[in-house]
Amino acid sequence: QVQLVESGGGLVQAGGSLRLSCAAIGRTFSSYTMGWFRQAPGKEREFVAGINWGGGSTYYADSVKGRFTISRDNAEKMVYLQMNSLKPEDTAGYSCAARYRSLWSMRTDEYDYWGQGTQVTVSS
């Protein structure tokens, strides 16, 4: 089992940057594929980025490709989302999620554990 705690959200102007962090509490963090998802008011939760366990391959939604970078530090049990060139449409609640020993997925129902989320607001 793993518990996830996000931090790093906030208010930023368009074009700015934020780095989100997700701390994992659990013994086998390196065995989890990690994902970042977001949900804007009135919209469904959507996949943002994923990083596989093992080799650490990364995947991105088309809407964030080239602007966001996901990374992980297995020793520190952390996963990060570096967000650059932020746009107002990136405004959402961002959550990290963990999937045990499976490759990344865009489907929310395929993740086993979720954090509470952190709010990102991008002003125009």
Image: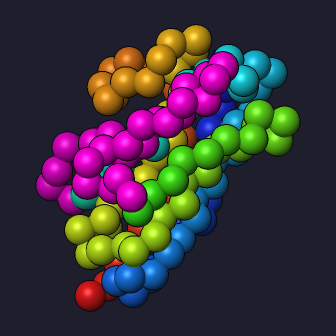
Q: Which residues are magenta?
A: 41-66
Above or below residue 14? Residue 117 is above
User: Quick check: can you spot residue 120?
Assistant: yes
Considering the whole magenta stretch, tell me its main secondary structure: loop
Residue 45 coordinates in the image, percent (x, y): 27, 42
Pick whichever, 87 or 119, lies toward us. Answer: 87
Residue at 77% from the left image edge and 34% from the top image edge: 74
User: Quick check: can you spot residue 116?
Assistant: no
Confirm whether the magenta stretch covers residue 46.
Answer: yes
Q: Residue furthest right?
A: 75
The quarter of the image holding the N terminus is: top right
The quarter of the image holding the C terminus is: bottom left
- Horizontal side, residue 120 vs residue 22: left or right: left
Residue 84 coordinates in the image, percent (x, y): 46, 70
Q: Residue furthest left?
A: 42
Residue at 51% from the left image edge and 13% from the top image edge: 102
Quadrant position of residue 98: top right
- How many numbered discs sit on the rendered protein? 0
Residue at 43% from the left image edge and 53% from the top image edge: 94
Above or below residue 115? Residue 6 is below
Residue at 62% from the left image edge and 38% from the top image edge: 4
Confirm whether the magenta stretch covers residue 55.
Answer: yes
Above or below residue 69? Residue 24 is above
- Horizontal side, residue 40 vs residue 53: left or right: left
Q: How is the image coloured?
A: rainbow
